[in-house]
Image (cartoon, rainbow, N blue to C red):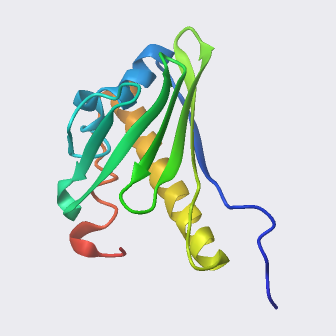
Amino acid sequence: MEYQLTKPPVAKAEMLIRKPAREAFEAIADPAFTTRFWFTKSSGRLEPGKWVEWEWEMYGFSTHAHVLEMEPDRRILLEWGDSEMTTIEWLFTPHSDQSTFVSVTNSGFSGENGDSLVAQAIGSTEGFTFVLAAMKALLEHGIELKVVADRHPGGIGG
């Protein structure tokens, strides 16, 4: 049986964070927070039009991100990658005064065939789910889960 894509695959992960939108937004925009749950080094804070480099030292990997648009406490739109760029949109929707529904969508995958595109979307969904869970643990409970660092320990499963 052969399957065909009728629309490009998109990765999406969402989670309620029991902190105000300002704190959830800053957890992504400010590398002083983000390096505690996602990447290990950053060349700077996210700002409109700015390019930053993110590094995952445990994997010997880095990539570049270009901030396309930002609406404080509401939205971050960026593209990331080195040779093949994809788009990431973070949305921070207030759920109450003390909670925010955070949604991250990754789109624009490219590859040789539909299988490659689907594999990239699934991998990205998995990765951003880990990022949101780690962000939630840090912001709500002060716990650094290290789930991103522990996803491929010593190259296992990667």
Q: In the shown orientation, is residue 65 left or right of residue 71?
A: left
Question: Residue 18, position in %: x, y?
Answer: 50, 22
Query: 5 or 20, which is in the foreground?
Result: 5
Query: 100 or 3, which is in the foreground?
Result: 3
Q: Residue at x 23, y 50 (%)?
A: 55
Query: 72 or 48, which is in the foreground?
Result: 48
Q: Quadrant of the C terminus?
A: bottom left
Q: Residue at x 36, y 44 (%)?
A: 65
Q: Is residue 114 above or below residue 25?
A: below
Q: Is residue 81 above or below residue 5?
A: above
**Residue at far bottom of view:** 1
Question: Residue 43, position in %: x, y?
Answer: 20, 37
Q: Residue at x 39, y 40 (%)?
A: 66
* The quadrant where residue 116 appears: bottom right
Q: Quadrant of the N terminus?
A: bottom right
Q: In the shown orientation, is residue 108 left or right of residue 135?
A: right
Q: Is residue 131 above or below residue 141?
A: below
Q: In the shown orientation, is residue 60 left or right of residue 88?
A: left
